[in-house]
Amino acid sequence: MNQEMPDSVMEMLEELLDGSLPQEDRTRFVELLHEHPEWLEEVSSQLAISGALSHWAHPDPGFVDLTWSHVSKLSGEDDQDFVRQFRMRLVKRRVVRGLAAAAVLGLALLPWFWIRPSNGANVAELSLTDAEGGIVSTRHVSAGERLKADAGLMRLSFRNGAVVAIEAPLDLMIESGSGLNLKRGRLNAWCPESAHGFVVKTATAQATDLGTSFGVSVGDGGRSEFVVLDGLVEVSKGDEKIRLGEGAALTADHAQGLKSVEFDATGFSKTWSLMQGILSTRGALVAAKPDTPEKLAQLENDQHVLVVPEKRDVAFDRPIRADVIRPGMLPGDIDGGPHVIPANPGKRLSAFQLRYNPVGTIPEEQFLRFEGEVTLDRPILAIQCQSGFLLGGEDMFASGHWQGDMPGIELTQIHNPPDNVVLSPDRRTVKIVFYAGRYTDAIRVIVEDN
């Protein structure tokens, strides 16, 4: 061990493990580890112990006692220098209180320790998510910075508006404010008009955005895969160039040129959801699998209510009519009457449908109960729940043509309680209960873009 960690840094680690370390101090903690890489082994040892506590919700009532016994034993071992320094501080109540933070937050932060900093200009904000999809830490990244991680999901929000979600194992270089070099890993990028021309380079090819949403993956052998979900991208290798439209895919490797392959974006599910701004789902709500806008509009599923992204970066140039415009429950403390939010041309909006659309036809008397929630990364401006409001928002937000009657939810039902929708006080989470039959149930969640 080249240099022992000072007490002040150890105290920051303690607070990290019990979940009390403020956001700005988390960032400083990571910066200190960049400056003192000799501390990484010690921190990793402590986080490895915390990782052993990842079953903090274990149903065995004796689990905490067994865990405490294990940690106490470690603290007495002569070769556990770092753990021994914690022996007098690590008390049983702190272990119990810190299990969740240590296992989820601590281990989630570990990939950050291997980020190589640069002195270039800040070009993007890097956000790291935990196992539950929450943003646990953010910091600025610079041109010329190299990012490496063995596990986890990260998101880069560039100053020009481009959003890139990346899944580890990864190795990439931030080349500029409008491009990166992906050496290994999987990503989804979304580029508004302000970010057209964004470039993703790999060892075997290069993708240039022409106004699109696309995915890129690079395996250990350097083979690259490119898929286009929306819009247009140009892929080039040497003098060879191919323009890909939505629903198209190709590969490139060292031995061959560009090769068209069957479109299959299912491997990009995690990065696509994070890129869209879906942080987490619970219960019967699940994120739709990545696909083209037209196919997303027609998705069917008997087991779940799907979270389906609609249009993004929509100009707020007209009023919005909705039945939910503030936190609360519909029906309940929200009456379901029409509410109008006046236009605000200075803002941009995006939308998601939360939709149950059964496969085929089911008996008219059959009803299923769906309960779940979704948390988004941007504040929710309004929710359109009844069919009239949904229909009024189609031309503004719909990404594909809907066939049949416009879906909605029922606030009064003969054979079931009413469907209900709850908007959380922080305006980030929507909870739903749908009593769904043979017809589609859906709501539209409208969010404010950053």
Image: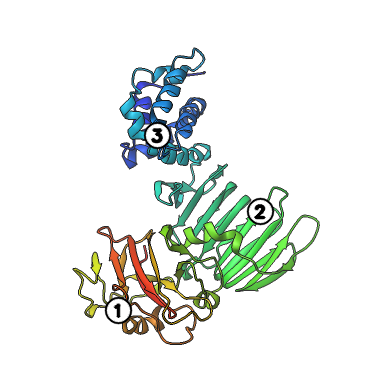
* Mark 3 Cα-neighbour bin, 10 Å: few <14, some 14–19, many ≥20: some
Residue 20 x/y as whole percent? 30, 37
Q: Are marks 2 and 3 in contact (CB under 8 Å)?
A: no
Mark 2 vs mark 3: which is more N-terminal? 3
Q: Position of residue 60 (x, y in %)?
A: 42, 35
Percent coordinates x, y for residue 63 in the rendering: 41, 31
- Label 1: how many Cα within 10 Å (few below 14, some 14–19, many 20+): few
Residue indicated by mark 3: 29
The answer to whether residue 76 is above or below residue 132 is above
Q: CA distance from mark 2 to mark 3?
A: 31 Å
Q: Nearer the viewer, residue 104 or 85?
A: 104
Amino acid at the residue labelled 1? Gln
Identify the residue position indicated by label 2 in the image: 218
SS at circle 3: helix
Front tag of 3 and 1? 1
* Mark-to-mark CA distance, 1 and 2: 51 Å
Type of residue at label 2? Val
* Residue under the image location 55 percent in, 42 percent down: 149
Crowd class of label 2 (few under 14; some 14 to 19; many from 20; radius 10 Å): many
- Identity, as a three-letter code, of the amino acid under mark 3: Phe
Report helix, strand or loop for mark 1. Answer: loop
Who is closer to the viewer here, 420 or 275? 420
* Residue 267 appears in the figure: yes
Q: Residue 336's spot in the image, x, y percent?
A: 23, 76
Q: Residue furthest right?
A: 255
User: Residue 237 sits in which quadrant?
Assistant: bottom right
- Tell me how far mark 3 sits from mark 1, CA to CA: 54 Å
Q: SS class of the residue under badge 2?
A: strand
Residue 414 horizontal side relative to residue 295, left or right? left
Q: Which residue is mark 1?
A: 413
- Which of the two discs, 3 and 1, labels the residue nearer the N terminus? 3
